Amino acid sequence: MENQDKFNRRDFLHKSLRTGIGLSLVGVAAFLARKTNAGNYVWQLDPSKCVQCGRCATNCVLTPSAVKCIHVYDMCGYCDLCGGYLRPETKEFNTAAESQLCPTSAIKRKFVEEPFFEYTIDEKLCIGCGKCVKGCNAFGNGSLQLQAQHKICVNCNECSIARACPAEAWSRVPLSEAYQLRGFENPKKG
Amino acid sequence: MNPAKPNRPDKEKNISVPMKKGASIAMLVILLALLALNNFGIQRFPKPDFESKYVVPATQAPMPRSIILEYLDVVVLLASISLVTWFVLKKRSRMGVFGVTVFSILYFGFYREGCICAVGSLQNVVLGLFHPEYHIPLTAIAFFIIPLLFALFYGRTFCAGVCPLGAIQDVFAIKPMKLNEWVQSLLGLVPYIYLGLAVLYAATGTDFIICRYDPFVGFFRVNAPFFMFVIGVLFLLVGVFIARPYCRFFCPYGVLLNLVSRVSKKHLSITPTVCIDCRLCENSCPFGAINKPLGHKSPESRNVTVKRLILFTILIPLFMLLGGFGGSMIHGNLANVNPKVRLASELLLPDNQLTSLQQVDVTTFRSSGQAVDKLNEEVASIRRQFYWGGWILGGFVGLVIGLTLARLAIPRYRKGYWPSKGECLSCGRCLEYCPVKPDMNDAQLNALKKSAAQ
Ligand code: SF4
Ligand code: SF4
Ligand code: SF4
Ligand code: SF4
């Protein structure tokens, strides 16, 4: 009899606790859901804040990094002496690896017409070190820009580059605002 | 192949207008856009007017995985938890659970690369609660709440075979050893501390430590930093003998599941009907989660009980106070993990004492033109948060230690073999050890009991 009582009391206690916990869980979820919008969020690098410190290459959870140099062709001057392609000390143009800025020779140079050259990034080789971006910003138009390549990026819960970035260039943005390229409108915004 | 294909074809048209005609318009648009945006990129060299048939390639901006697929993950999560729950509670089938385990390793593990997972989502929830400006993804909310709701009604069926971290450890639990109760309880304190730290760091917007120190995500991505790879291998190797070490002695989300599951409505039971104390299942649980019958029927004297009650009502608040004090003492060290706090202290150092990494932080900060005063103000407020956070964290740890001691000290009385609702991972291994069948009548049960006694 006494045992029976004990069990009933315990059942009741568990039931109340269950209801309480259940309601508060749903409450928390509802509270949070109120603020979210239906879309997802991605990690986005703002190239106007980036100082090309090199941590994008080393701090990504992926090797090579999900950050790639993206070329905004519309901004490019198609220069012969490209500040992003050649080392600054290189006086004359020369496509030998030692006169290239890119450590992996990921930038391909192609003659277009006198005196213009097209520069294309081989994404498979690019490690996101930002050396070319720095050169292009210093001597050129700034058409080479670092971006998280969203097809490669696994969209970590907490981007480990964002935490290491000295320039606070990273933020979480709605999917519709992925890519902040200068001189290029977001493809989604269209 | 055209290297440049943004997702929308109309956009492509827009971008790669043959420059001969569109050049001047495009230039104007770009210049205006540049003026409007910022003065960052300087158009030192005008875009050429190409004479040849050259077409300017479109800029590549491939879009991420579609949102539909993210929602699909939630559906898969729901489906696989429901399936495990059904296997454990209705079918009582370990094979079924194992099947889902393998599926989870493949889907949530290798295909989704261990992200998003319920364990980490707890930090998103905390960040969302403390930082109204943070927009938590719907999927993170779903991954946080679904396993907890299931645990509230059916026990930790999420852990049984859906969690990718648990699943990968589960298949390595080959030769599990029994741990001493005290050792198990002591190590069991670690997840509470880990949970406290994770909440503190998420609430202050410092870091997601659960994700950073996730030992298995590196395997799933086949891309682990060396240090985490070693840790992961260690966990799996230890896991051969001490089943699921991460789940039992680290997992912070497991703490929540454990607490919630204690009041679950319908939890797995080893026997389908009644326990006949045959002891066949006694050693079947690799996680030491089976409660054995305990104690003597004769109750201890009232005096002893009252004394112990008084002792613990004094001891537990004392532990909490001590813990809180300790936590507040080390709040400086805790806060140093925060990048802003670190930057502020680096700014105080003379330049020649900075490492090259710190040098980058300092020069970037200086060249950004932000005011040091503003940073210091922010840092002071972060430190304050850590001070109070340290008190709360320490108090919480003190409370947990006190309650654990109380649980170990208080003699209990238990009948039969039942899984401990909190610690049981609902893996279903013990089920096949029980000789009782659901449709046995009393005579058959008695016969079983007799043969078991011999
Ligand atoms: S870590 Fe920040 S500053 Fe450094 S290269 Fe990446 S975005 Fe630029
Ligand atoms: S979110 Fe992850 S994968 Fe993407 S850039 Fe950051 S660290 Fe790399
Ligand atoms: S205890 Fe944690 S890591 Fe283990 S299965 Fe459960 S949620 Fe996953
Ligand atoms: S179902 Fe629970 S009690 Fe049974 S073996 Fe698995 S974890 Fe242990």
Image (tube, grey):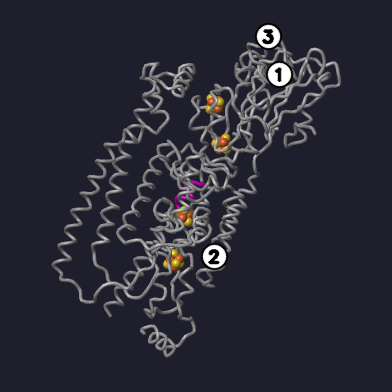
The residues bearing labels 3 and 1 have C-alpha atoms spaced at a distance of 13 Å
- The amino acid type, in three-letter code, at marker 1 is Ala
Q: Which residue is mark 3?
A: A91
Q: Secondary structure at mark 3?
A: loop
Image position of B141 with respect to A80: above or below: below
Instruction: Report the magenta stretch's main SS.
Output: helix
Residue B403 forms part of the magenta stretch: no
**Pointer 1 chain:** A
Q: Which residue appears at 57% of the width and 56% of the height?
A: B104
- Tell me the tag on residue A96: 1
Q: Quick one: which residue is furthest to the bottom in this view? A: B443
Q: Nearer the viewer, residue B201 or A10?
A: B201
Q: Is residue A15 visible?
A: yes
Q: Amino acid at mark 3?
A: Lys
Q: Is residue A145 above or below residue A92?
A: below
Marks 2/3 in contact by CB < 8 Å: the verdict is no
Q: Quadrant of ligand 1?
A: top right
Q: What range of the chain is rendered magenta?
A: A25-33
Percent x, y for residue B146? 51, 56
Residue B253 on image: x %, y %: 43, 52
Q: Is residue A42 visible?
A: no
Gap in angstroms between the C-alphas marked 2 and 3: 68 Å
Q: Chain of mark 3?
A: A
Q: Residue at x 46, y 75 (%)?
A: B433
Q: How many neighbours does mark 3 have within 10 angstroms: few (below 14), some (14-19), or many (20 or more)?
A: few
According to the picture, the residue beneath numbered tag 2 turns out to be: B97
Q: Secondary structure at mark 1?
A: loop
Determine if marks 1 and 2 fall on one subunit: no
What is the three-letter code of the residue carrying label 2?
Val
| Dot in front, 1 or 2 | 1
Disc 1 crowd, CA 10 A, few/some/many (<14, 14-19, 20+): few
The quarter holding residue B411 reads bottom left
